[in-house]
Every structure is written in C-alpha cells, then in structure tokens.
Image (cartoon, rainbow, N blue to C red):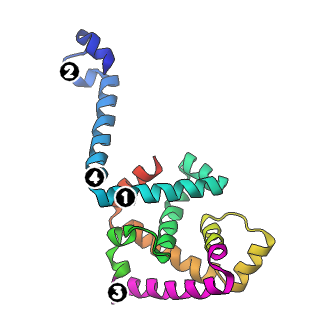
Amino acid sequence: MRKYEQNIEVVDPQLKNNVELVEILVEFENSWSQGLTYFLNSKKLNQLLHFSQVIEAIGEKHKQFADQLEQRDTEIFVIIPSLLILKSIENDDKEICSFFYPEIIDKNSEKGKIMLQLKVNYETCRKKLGGYEFYNLVEKCLIEVALNETENKKSLELDLERSLIKEIRGLAMCLSRFKPADWNKFLDVVIK
C-alpha cells in the first residue's frame, strides 16, 4: 500500500490488472471480516484467546501435534474438535462447544445424554488414575502420540480407546459439522 501511496500512477484503472494490490486487498478484507466476528464481541474474543492458548500449549507439549498444525495435516481437523470436547468435559471450554453444537448441552437430546454419560465415565476413570495424569493420557490418545509402556498399560486397563476416546471423537465430528462454515472460520483463526 505504501508503494502505491508514493506513486499512484502505477496502478492500472482496472483493478483486476493489479494482481499484487488485489491480493493485499483480499487479505485485508478477510482480516477485517474475522476481526468483526471475533474481536468486537468480547465473549467470542475470550473464547478465541482461550482456545488459541490451549492449542499453543498442546503444541509446546507435543512436537508431533505442533508439526501437524504447521503442515495443516488433515488429522488436526479431527484432533482439534476432540481436544475441545475434552476441555468441555473438564468444564474448561468457555462454552465454545455449546455455541458450535448446542445439542451437546441439551440433557434431553441424544448427544446431550452421551455427553452427560461421557462426563460420568471420565470422572470415574479420573478418580482411578488421578486428575492431571488421566487428562494427559486422554490428551495423548486423542492426539495419537505414542504412549510409553506404563501409559499404554493404563490405557488398556481403562479401555480408553474403545470407550472414552471413541465417544469424544464422535461428538467432535458432530461439533465440527453442526455449523461447518462458522466452525471452519473459528478454526482458521485459531490455527493462524
């Protein structure tokens, strides 16, 4: 933009002939649109910041996840909503799940009942193993990080893969598909 400010004559009167300028304007428009959606609404801004920090922290803990994020690996589009469901189970999602998938908090809906049962099962396993240790184990299973021998044994004992992880992934797919356009915009901002 500064380049054109100094010499406006280099701009072709037909905008389509100014490829560099068009690219800048498109990027500006997209940023403006995202800003209107997320930065002017304090609740959405807090949700965005919170979940961005969660994603960043997980990336710092697990190099494999950080690499997947950087490469935009297709797996992250299943992993990220799964991590959000895990945060919701922990009551630490800042109501993001309920915004993108309201059925998840409706105690009379099928998915709401699944979520309630999932929370009960999660708490039961958590008491057996210990809070922080169990959370990390579930997180690793969702990200598909290789477990050490002890973690693998605990995972098999608790039957995590067949029960808890399967249910979390199922709800995560529903979450990302309920309002796909809104979810994709949110995910785009979180990943950037």
Residue at left 34%, top 55%? 45
* Residue depicted at 80% across the width and 72% down the height: 149
Residue highlighted by disc 2: 14
Q: In the image, what residue type sits under mark 2?
A: Gln
Q: Which of marks 4 and 2 is nearer the N terminus?
A: 2
Q: What amino acid is found at the position of numbered circle 3 in the picture? A: Ser
Query: What residue lies at 26% left-to-right and 51% top-to-bottom?
Result: 40
User: Sequence-wise, which precedes: disc 3 or disc 1?
Assistant: 1
Residue 6 % position (x, y): 28, 11
Nearest to viewer (mark 3 / mark 1) = 1
Cα–Cα span, label 3 and label 1: 28 Å
Q: Do the residues labelled 3 and 4 touch (CB within 8 Å)?
A: no
Contact between marks 1 and 4 (CB within 8 A): the answer is no
Residue 109 marker: 3
Please report whichever mark, 3 or 2, sits nearer to the chain's N-terminal start.
Answer: 2
What kind of secondary structure does the magenta stretch mostly adopt? Answer: helix
Q: In which quarter of the image is the N terminus?
A: top left
Disc 1 designates what residue? 46
| Residue wearing tag 4 | 37
Disc 4: CA contacts within 10 A as few (<14), some (14-19) or many (>=20): some
